[in-house]
Image: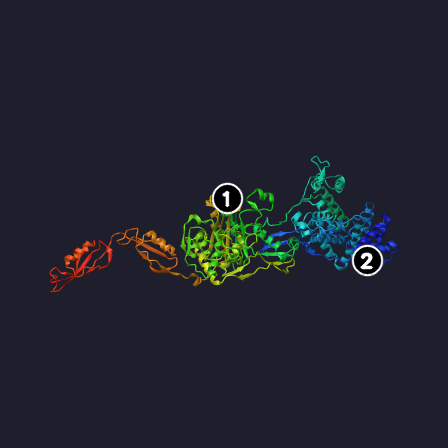
Amino acid sequence: MPENKRTANGVLGGIVGLVGLSAAAGVLVTAAVTPAIAVSGAAANSAISIFDSMPDYLEIDELMLPTTLWAGDQVLAQFFDQNRSPVTFDQVAPVMYDAVLSSEDPRYYQHGGIDLIGTTRALLNNAANGQTQGGSSISQQYVKNVLVQRCERNARATEATDTQPAQTRDEVLRSCATEAIQAEGPEGYQRKLQEMRYAISLEKRYTKDEILLGYLNIANFGGTTYGIDAAAKYYFSVPASQLSVSQSAMLAGMVQNPNRFRIDLPNGSIFSADGTIGYNKAPDGSIDDVDRSTIQALYTLLDNGEITQEQLLTAADGYSATKGRQLYVLSQMEETGKITHEEYVAAAIEPITPQITQPSQGCASSVAPYYCQYVVATILDDPAFGETEDDRQRALRQDGLNIYTTLDLRMQDAAQTAMSDYAPQSVEGMRFGSTAVNVESKTGRVLSLAQNTKFTQDAEVAANDPGSTSIVFAGDLDKGGSQGFNAGSTFKLFTLVDWLEQGRSVNEPVNGRDGPVPNMKNSCYGNYVNTDNARIRNFDQQSGYVGTPMQFTRQSLNTGYLGMAAQLDLCDIAKTAKKMGVTLATGKDIEMRFGNNVIGSDAVSPLAMAGAYATVANGGTYCQTKVIDRVTDNKGAERPAPERSCTPVLSPEVAATAAFALQGVMTSGGTGSQANPGDGTPVLGKTGTHEAVNSWMIESSTNVTTAVWAGNYTGLESIFNKRYNGRTLNNVRYPIARDIQQAADEFYGGESFPQPDNTLTRRILRDVPNVVGQSIDDASATLERAGFSVAIGDPIDSSSGPDTVASQTPSGQAGAGSTITLSPGNGQAATVPSVAGQSLPEATATLQGAGFTSLSLGNCVTQPDAPDQGQATGTNPGPGTSTNRNTPIAIDVIAKNCG
């Protein structure tokens, strides 16, 4: 404790009795106000010395003000410890000044900070109780309020020391505030003297009007209502400039004991039903006996015939203690000439009729509560708002900041509408959740965040109602309280990107046939070895095939991506995810230790995944997601906002080629085609499911990315066998994403994605095995092992039967992964034999022996030395031709006479 306080205790503790107390006060006050007046006596000299040694400069701190979150020019939410809306001097009704001065400090404009008459009277009245209450001027009350507010602003929890136990913030605050308003014993005397010292100093630095306004702006009016304007709006739904006489008198009466006289907690009436004296409950729940003296002024008016019994009962009903205090203020206003007797009577019989307007605080009443909650989590986590958690809490609840968010209300409306249209708020037997988030790909600005559940911060409600929660599904553990969700096939993006970064082509053949998960390299944590021949199946039990990353991406083939990952390094895939902004929702890095990590077994946040896909849409530049554009203080000066950056993490060639592959997902036959808005704006995308408990749809134009998740936010219930509005729960993702992306396309547009890189889309030519003559099954197996797909064509004329390959197309070389068409024989073909040099009868017999029955004479050339039976020179079709046995064969001959 400071030395001057101990000295004061020593001196004042020795001043005993009414005379000594009054004399000391008179001496100190006189010396402070008129220091030229000579005083004498050892006690007086000692007291003056102490008074002069006390600090005389009190810094007037910034008022504690609500911090406001903005979405454009609309308030998104406010947060405060003290609800206050400061006003200028002209924005307060003059009658309010009259009311507070008449009742609290009628000589305010005559004294120099201390009302000598009022202080002496208070000391005389209270000396018998050993207290120093009352008699404070407006300037002194202002000082006390400044000190109490400083306590609240600076209160911090403390840790235990060798001499002091640990204290909570509330305990520290209570101790500090008690000291600031201490009224008993020597410490109370010292506090009062210090208050006087500060008050005198204030009067030298500020005008009377400035001090009076400062007092009305800082004073408490019950609960968290601070300042005259907030009080007027809260209790009467009018600004301070429109307060009436009776309203002003009531509010002026409250400042003496704000929580005792507040009128938002009515607890009974002074009169019972039969008009006899009753009781009134105080806000703390205790019952105060009320006697006639509480409202004696009304009875005086009744006795004088100025009001009726009915008017008396009506005026007093409901708020007896407050009415009594109001009557006191009104009487002081009449006494000081601020109102007439008629005005006094009119105000006295006017019932206290509060028109409570509850101030909105927190995210629950926000148009975007989960977005709001995510912003709050960002504020409380980011050093831009303070080094410690206490500092950041103060910034949120006391500093009066204006925080301008990235929320686009048009997109938020579209997102929440889509969510409400297609996703249920809750599903019996499970904790079903869904969220949708929009990210501007070129900046990382989060444009909207919608969720299916009802926002609540009541733990009991959340525990008992699966449709209510404060968890932000789109966020992570630090920002939103979410553990994240298994990414499913949306995670294949990182294998695709790593494949391309290794220079591999999206048209390169890969073995994607169903089988045991292949062993995989992991240079960071040790290789994955499938020792138990574990299998990972494809969606809908597809068998798999040898294909290309283009095909695997479009059809989301698990076995295809496992085949790709087997040719890569799992550690590189994990690093790819990290540089594109994706970690586990817990904040830890993804490690990719197992095969199922490739297809999205890790729990990640939808917002992070949206940022990763936005990276591809943005040409390879990753922008950290952000929800705050700028911050200003309560005077409009710029303050640092959370730092966010955009960094190139993929080459333009890789990004363009990945986008090329992902566009196939959104076309007809692709797994995401149901979510394509079909408005002409090019979009890429990827679907994902995991173990029938989570589902995803992520899509993006060049400008805006939409990520939708739907599934279990707790538990493992199947979303494939539960329906809502005609859809299974795993399919609600499609229309939600479609409608939101359509709105994004409308408001933000989108261009064509860059053309893919030629090298990364090159077709790999490979030799095609010759399988003609093999059985269809053997031929197909041979071609698939070589990395080709197989199609069976129509039978062709051949001597071989339908189980044998008669022809293949193409042959020689073909692009890797190409389809080879195999044509079986029909058993109806024969080869035309050579009959040249044979006589015509011999040639006919030869052809008939080969199976041809439709024979005719072809070209005949007359030649005198020809054999008598003629001689065959050829056929049409020619020898060696394989053709159907019913094909007409013409025999060319020479003869002596062709006629």
Query: On the image, numbered disc 1 is attached to which residue?
Result: 717
| Label 2 Cα neighbours within 10 Å, binned few <14 / some 14-19 / many ≥20 | some
Image location (x, y in percent) of residue 215: 72, 53
Specify the farthest residue to the right.
41
Image location (x, y in percent) of residue 397: 65, 52
Query: On the image, numbered disc 2 is attached to which residue?
Result: 52
Specify the farthest residue to the bottom.
864
Image location (x, y in percent) of residue 690: 49, 49
* Vertical placement of residue 629 versus 482, above or below: below
49 sits to left or right of 161:
right
Compare residues 662 and 812 and report the one nearer the observer.
812
Q: Earlier in the sequence, mark 1 or mark 2?
A: 2
* Vertical placement of residue 156 versus 754, above or below: above
Would you say residue 854 is visible in this rendering? no
| Label 1 Cα neighbours within 10 Å, binned few <14 / some 14-19 / many ≥20 | some
Number of the front mark, 1 or 2: 1
Specify the farthest residue to the front.
531
Q: Secondary structure at mark 1?
A: loop
Type of residue at label 1? Glu
Quadrant housing residue 459: top right
Colour treatment of the image:
rainbow
